[in-house]
C-alpha cells in the first residue's frame, strides 16, 4: 500500500479528491509528472515544484507530449519562480506548460474560481470577457474606434478583446470598467490547454524502446517517444502505451516503472503493454509482448491484432 504523500503533492491530491477527481501519484523522481487525474472528460498531468525555475525544458517537453497523447492538460504547481512568489490570482507559464499556485489550483478544481490574470513576456494581462465588452460598448453607442480612443489603445486591440484573442493591462481594464460601468474581466479556464504547434518527434530513451519506436513508425504508427515518463511510447492511432524492459534495468526500477505505468493506465483507461527483448519479468498485472513478435509485424492491422486492440485513427 502506498503511503499518504506529504508536501505539495499531498495537498494537490487532497484537493483533487475533494473535487471528485480520480487521481493517482506517480512515485519516481525521474519522471516529468507526479500526479495523473481524471474527472469526466477532464484529464490532468501534474508536476509540483516549490521553485518552478528548477524544472528543465526536456522534462517539460515530455510533459506536454504526454498531455497531447492522452488529451490532458499539463500543470506545474509551485510557490516560486523568477526570483519571486507565484501570485494566487495569476497563471504563469514555463516552457509552454501552465504554472499555478496550489491554492489557485484548488480554487479552480473545487469552486470553479478561475484566475483572471496571466503572465506573458514579463507583463501581467487580464483576460477580457469579449461578449460582455461588446454588449456594453454597443449599449453605450460606441464604435470600436471611439472606445479605443477613449481607453488609449488601437481599434484592432478592442476588436481582439471582443474576440477573446488578446489580454489587457490593468490600466486598460480600469479605463474600460470606468467608461462602461461594469466588470469586463473573465477567468482563465486553466483546464482547457492546447499545444501550440506539433508535439516533438523524438526518440525514447533505451535500446529496446528505440528499436520499438522505429518499427512502429515504419508500419504507419503515430508514435510519440518519451524519456522522462513511466511509458516510453504512446501510439495515437492505436491508443496504446508501451514501456520497455531494458537490458541494464534492475528489478526494482522495472517494478517501479510498471507500477507507475499501470497507475497512468488505470486513471486514463489505457492499460500499458510491456515490451521485452528476451525474458519476461515476474509481474502478472501487465500484458507482455516480445520485441521480436512486433518486429515480425508488417502493417498496422497486424499490430492491432497482435495486441488485441482496434485502430482508432485519433489525431489528437
Image: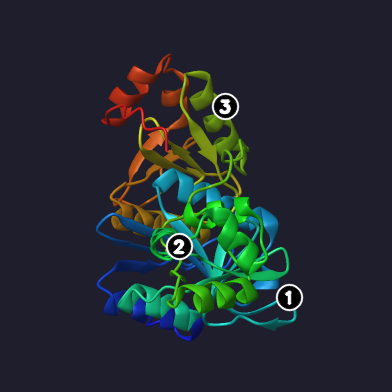
Front tag of 3 and 1 = 1
Q: Is residue 63 visible?
A: no
Foreground pick, 149 / 250: 149
In x, y percent, where is residue 48? 54, 73
User: Considering only order in the chain, which callout, 2 or 3, is on the residue closer to the N terminus?
Assistant: 2
* Residue in the picture at 32% in, 25% down: 304
The quadrant of the image that shows the N terminus is: bottom left
Asked whether, in this view, residue 231 is left or right of residue 157, the answer is left
Q: In which quarter of the image is the C terminus?
A: top left
**Mark 2–mark 1 distance (CA, rounded to whole Å):** 38 Å
Q: Cα distance, mark 3 to mark 1?
A: 39 Å
Residue 144 shows up from this direction: yes
**First in sequence: mark 3 or mark 1?**
1
List x then y, in percent, for residue 108: 38, 74
Q: Is mark 3 on a helix, strand or loop?
A: helix
Q: Nearer the viewer, residue 248 or 21?
A: 21
| Kind of element beneath mark 1 | loop
Q: Residue 214 carries which label?
A: 3
Amino acid at each position: 500500500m502506498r503511503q499518504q504523500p506529504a508536501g505539495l503533492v499531498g495537498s494537490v491530491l487532497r484537493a483533487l479528491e475533494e473535487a471528485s477527481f480520480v487521481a493517482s501519484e506517480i512515485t519516481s523522481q525521474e519522471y516529468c509528472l507526479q500526479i495523473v487525474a481524471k474527472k469526466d472528460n477532464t484529464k490532468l498531468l501534474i508536476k509540483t515544484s516549490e521553485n518552478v525555475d528548477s524544472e528543465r525544458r526536456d522534462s517539460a517537453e515530455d510533459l506536454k507530449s504526454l498531455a497531447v497523447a492522452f488529451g490532458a492538460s499539463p500543470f506545474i504547481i509551485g510557490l516560486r519562480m523568477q526570483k519571486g512568489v507565484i501570485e494566487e490570482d495569476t497563471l504563469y507559464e514555463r516552457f509552454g506548460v501552465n504554472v499555478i499556485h496550489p491554492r489557485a489550483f484548488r480554487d479552480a478544481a473545487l469552486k470553479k474560481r478561475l484566475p483572471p490574470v496571466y503572465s506573458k513576456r514579463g507583463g501581467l494581462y487580464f483576460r477580457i470577457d469579449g461578449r460582455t465588452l461588446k454588449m456594453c460598448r454597443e449599449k453605450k453607442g460606441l464604435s470600436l474606434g471611439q472606445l479605443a480612443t477613449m481607453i488609449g489603445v488601437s481599434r484592432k486591440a478592442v476588436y481582439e478583446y471582443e474576440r477573446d484573442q488578446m489580454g489587457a493591462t490593468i490600466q486598460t481594464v480600469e479605463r474600460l470598467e470606468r467608461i462602461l460601468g461594469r466588470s469586463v474581466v473573465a477567468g482563465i479556464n486553466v483546464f482547457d490547454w492546447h499545444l501550440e504547434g506539433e508535439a516533438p518527434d523524438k526518440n525514447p530513451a533505451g535500446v529496446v524502446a528505440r528499436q520499438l519506436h522505429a518499427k512502429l513508425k515504419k508500419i504507419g504508427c503515430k508514435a510519440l517517444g518519451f524519456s522522462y515518463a513511466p511509458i516510453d511510447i504512446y501510439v495515437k492511432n492505436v491508443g496504446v502505451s508501451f514501456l520497455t524492459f531494458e537490458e541494464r534495468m534492475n528489478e526494482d526500477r522495472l517494478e517501479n516503472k510498471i507500477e507507475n505505468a499501470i497507475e497512468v493506465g488505470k486513471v486514463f483507461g489505457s492499460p500499458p503493454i510491456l515490451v521485452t527483448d528476451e525474458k519476461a519479468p515476474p509481474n502478472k498485472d501487465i500484458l507482455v509482448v516480445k520485441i521480436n513478435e512486433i518486429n515480425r509485424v508488417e502493417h498496422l492491422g497486424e499490430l492491432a491484432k497482435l495486441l488485441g486492440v482496434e485502430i482508432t485513427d485519433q489525431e489528437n
